[in-house]
Amino acid sequence: MKLKSLIYKASNTALYISKDTAQIVPKYSCYRHIRLLALAAFVLCISACSDSSNAQLNSYGQRLENLSGQQRIITVTKTSPHQPRVAELRLSLPQVSISLLDSFRLSECRLGQLIAERNSSLGKVMTPANQLYYEIQVTRAIQECLSTAEQISVNLRTELEQALATKEAALPLAVHNFLTTDDIWRSNFRVAHSSLPMSTADDFTHTMAALNYFAHTLTIVVTNPYQPELNLNLWQEHLEALNRSRFLSAYWHTLATVPKELDSLTELLQRTTEHISCSHIARPQQAEYLHNVMLNIYIAQLQPVFARWVHYEQQLTPVLSQLLNLTRGNAWQDYMQQLGYAPTSALQHSSRLHAEQWQALLQKCRLSPAGNESN
């Protein structure tokens, strides 16, 4: 039976706890002794409650080192790629001006109100997100005005038609600026200092919903901004969800570090398999202890998390690719490749190799992934 097919079949075998070593304990006052015990309990509680994948992997690695009598080969952690500067990425949008008198003549159109808002003090300072939202709204408003307004002079109609053509051509540029220069997007596409948590409390659901919304909405904006299905009502809601979320930045850190950590543990297991003294007639207690660690930690705790992260990547890759196709030039696309976006999963590859190495050790020691002895 393949080890990787037994992700959720954990045995009830107790975890191995190493024997306490004898120590000379100095005499303390009762009060100080109680304080030390309380401090130790607090530290153990903090360690046990830690949900960091790095902490969990490190604990798993330390158990393997203790049981194998060997040490991991520490590899250098991947450094974060340099995010291109805003000035390198920002594209200039063509300007369209309508006189104040003409804007008054457009009072019967929604366009007149948008022009007035744009000329206000707040309208003159816009984030790339607000700029794009405005460009979409004003483009649709010009088209509505040309279709419905009756009291428009020939000259003003010609001016509006020219403005509409300019705005339509500028929408892909505004989309690019939004995806590459807005602070919210840039913070999401930057490596965090920690990996994803082991639990499901990682905000994947809200982040994925926001990414899907913008991938769908911005694709419509670029292809046909007048489609009835273009829904801007949820724009601010999903933008705020991305602003609050730390999922993507932790996700990039996970892709950069966890496969390397897992590969170092696979190499440790390989050396352990080579040196362990299992035979067809004898099996050392060391093998039984390693078996417990595999069942209770790797299969019960880690493998389901790795499987969930691989599933995340399978869902994220198409939508990230769709968003990436809406950007211009090579700078941002090159950065995304360095960041970790790719159609293949290094984590999936590393997890498979690790499971195969466990299987090799179990076969040598006549142990089953199911938790009983193999014939």
Image (cartoon, rainbow, N blue to C red):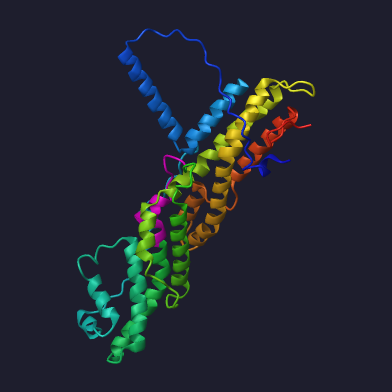
For the residue pair 353 and 35, the one nearer the viewer reads as 35
Q: Position of residue 237 (x, y in %)?
A: 36, 62
Classify residue 315 by image quadrant. bottom right
Q: Give the total number of marks visible in the rendering.
A: 0
For the residue pair 126 and 200, the one nearer the viewer reads as 200
Residue range of the region highlighted in magenta in the rendering: 177-195
Q: Position of residue 282 (x, y in %)?
A: 76, 20
Q: Is residue 156 magenta?
A: no
Q: Position of residue 271 (x, y in %)?
A: 66, 26
Left or right: 18 in relation to 148: right
Q: Indicate whether 62 appears above or below 341.
A: above
Q: Indicate whether 206 appears above or below 364.
A: below
Q: Is residue 300 visible?
A: yes
For the residue pair 268 and 368, the one nearer the viewer reads as 368
Left or right: 344 in relation to 136: right
Q: Indicate whether 327 appears above or below 187.
A: below
Q: Quadrant of the C terminus?
A: top right
Q: Is residue 72 visible?
A: no
For the residue pair 292 and 210, the one nearer the viewer reads as 292
Residue at point 42%, 78% (across, down): 226
Residue at point 72%, 20% (across, down): 277
Q: Is residue 191 magenta?
A: yes
Left or right: 130 in relation to 261: left
Left or right: 216 in relation to 277: left
Residue at point 44%, 78% (across, down): 228
Classify residue 109 by image quadrant. bottom left
Q: Position of residue 37 (x, y in %)?
A: 38, 20
Residue at point 23%, 79% (across, down): 99
Q: Quadrant of the N terminus?
A: top right
